[in-house]
Amino acid sequence: MNTPQPPSLKQSSRYEPSVLSSTNEELQLMLPAELSFDWQLEMPAAVTVPLDSPAIKIVGCVFPEGAAGLDPILPPTGLAKPATLPKPLVSSKVPGGITIDLKTCTRVRPPQDIVKLEDRLLYLLQPPLERVFANQSMEFPFQPFPYQLDGIAFLYPRNEAVIADEMGLGKTMQAIVAMRLLAHQGHVRRMLIVCPKPLVTNWQREIAMWAPELPVTTVEGKQSRRQWLWENVQSGVLLSNYESLIRDRESAASAPAPFDLMIIDESQRIKNRLSTTNQAICSIPRRRSWALTGTPIENSVEDLVGIFQFVSPGCLQPQMKVSAIRRSVKDYVVRRTKDKVLTELPPKLFRDADLILLPEQQQAYQLAEEQGIVRLSEMKKDLTIQHVFELVLRLKQICNFDPATGASAKADRMEADLEECAASGRKAIVFSQWVASIEKLRGRLERFNPLEYHGKIPSKHRDGVLEEFRNDPDRHVLLMSYGAGSVGLNLQFAGYVFLFDRWWNPAVEDQAINRAHRIGASGPVTVTRFLCSGTIEERINSVLEEKRELFNSVFDPEAPTSPSGKIGLSREEIFGLFQLKFPGQEVSNEAA
Amino acid sequence: MPPEPANSLPAFGFLTVLEDPLHGFFGGYLVLSDLGRPLEFHCSTPVLPNEAQKILYGATLRPYVLGEIIGQTLVAKGKLSVQAVVTDIEEMLSLALFRDEKMACLASNETAPAQQTGELSSPELRLGNYRLFGTSTCTWQPEQLGAAMATLCAHVDLAEPFQRIREAIREAQRIAEPQADDLHEHSSAA
């Protein structure tokens, strides 16, 4: 047989006859027919092993700064992009400041609304935040905590963000440093900060500390001056307060160009989306919207809807389910709690002072309650939540002081506790809902030389009060109202907090407590909660404790969700305090 | 061959792979300015050698796949010329046979240098906590490379860009396969 073979194999595997040119046919002719044979060897089977190079595809890009060396490419507009050519505004040196420790490595990660791979990679491939600060010679008064750097890295790439850290973790500083970084890199030039009026000086101080090169203009003074500022300040930070902004809303909304960045502090102020404050804030044109709050949910998850009307309009809708809200806000909100990130913060010790009303108080309380309930029962269809509310307030006031004699189990206990506090040289903050109670308490605590901070103290005197409390060793007690003193103030030198009466909402109480229990606290903070047994205070407290979990249900994926979605008292619950049934009138849906 | 210098930016390449037991080797090549800012980035689809290649290449498989296949393709894709290509994987140094760029492998100062064998010596350079070394086929001069990298070293921890590359590879892979786990979710975001 004659099997076709590759030429190279033909020669090497065959017997070579003497006549090299002879073919098979020729040999056959030479041999006798009976001696005919096939002298060729059978070839082995061959298997081809593929050794092609593994297939490989490449994706990638040249970033704007690299492309600048190739061809001129205009940077895309829209979302904030990492810096290409940072130019410090002025000197970034902080007197006595430090450069960031390079031992940690904090990365900026792109928000989810950046979808283009090239844009996402540009964020991921940036140097760590610590290096960016160091390379730009940005100094700080002290080394930020790692979670604070995380917060800055969270804010930096986002046009829409909420820092919802627990009170005392340094939201203000994180916002200022992120703003400073954006300003250094030329992404923002004209910024607006809106905060509660008592916190304006706090912001001025913090900006001077964390971003001293940023010029700050406070919107204050006569209307004509304010209007001029709104229209003519074209760079730096414009600092306003909610009350002033409502008056200036037309000037602010018709500013010549959108603000590059707008920050609202204590953003729970705009939780009611139909309020004038919310509408005034949301009407201001801006490119970036950041909200700071320690209590994004004070009463119900609807509060978040109001805040997001500013942060990201349309992201949340009224009546959304808690689970849907949780999903929707996930990429916009960062929230850390002290127990998770500040494990070295001194502990916060709670002490519930369960008190028995003094006989005079007991008598007044019983009379007021009996008469009140009878009156409410008789009102039938005319009964509204306001009527019930009035009775609750009346009874709570009696729990503080007997209106006729001034007798007070709480004040007696307070005096005893403050003896210990003053003897140890520590300072205490006492919170009450009512200025009237504070004024009565002032008389009882005269020997402790108390200071007062509430709505009757003129704004221009308030900073002086705090400075005196901070610096005067003979001033041991600061009497504060929840309304004036529960947000934004740094009173970490106080070791004791007394809640003389209880607020309607645990979130507000937490805010108050955290004036003292925050970064810089030198020792444990003891919180004493006064509660009169067998009274309306006890009943309210038990309802609020049950509902405290709601807050976590939005921000903690493992927490169960509350079907009612409310953390404050609902109208049904307020009626239930006296075993009354809600008659169905058109009343406000919530009390707190 | 490297592209003709198209710009005057002092740039450095960082080359590494992310090894995945299921998919194989993902390559990543990052070009940084001497201030540490990203100028260019390329990453590869995963390369998974088949059984025949594993048997036939034996001990030379990793240098072949990492240097010749992944490294060469990635560096060739770069548009910006670089003063050196730094890798943190020694097998990548085989790329020096195919490219003209200076190739150097980064290691901690604490790791002992390999024994020199043969007549040809391998270049080595110490920079702070790190040492850079090449193979005998690497022709760079330690003094020159040290001078060229001085600014970069002042602004960048030389091991840090490899972390960036790995994160970027994960991100690119996550986008390519949306069903894959989100490997980089912000841990503290609510």
Image: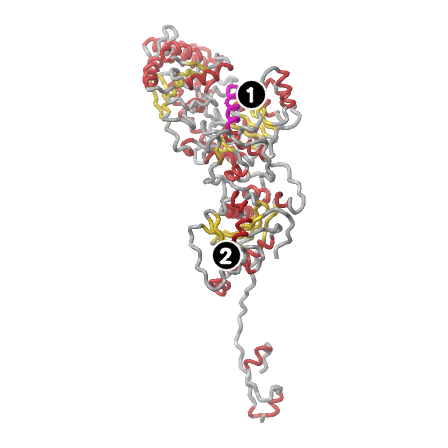
Where in the figure is residue B159, as x and y percent of width and height? Answer: 49, 47
Host chain of mark 2: B
Host chain of mark 1: A
- Exactly how many numbered labels are in the figure? 2
**Which residue is located at x 49 percent, y 18 percent?**
A584
Looking at the rendering, the stretch of residues picked out in magenta corresponds to A197-209
Query: Label 1 crowding class (10 Å Cα cut-off): few <14, some 14-19, many 20+?
Result: many
Instruction: Report the residue that reaches farthest toward the top.
Output: A404
The residue to which callout 2 is attached is: B123
Along the line of sight, the residue nearer the viewer: A28 or A385: A28
For the question of whether residue B151 can be seen, the reply is yes
For the question of whether residue A266 can be seen, the reply is no
Judge whether A112 appears above or below A304 on screen.
below
Q: Quadrant of the N terminus of chain A?
A: bottom right
The residue to which callout 1 is attached is: A242
Q: Are marks 1 and 2 in contact (CB under 8 Å)?
A: no
Instruction: Report the residue that reaches farthest toward the front.
Output: B143
Where in the figure is residue B185, as x and y percent of width and height? Answer: 50, 41
Where in the figure is residue A567, as x and y percent of width and height? Answer: 45, 25
Q: Is residue A206 magenta?
A: yes
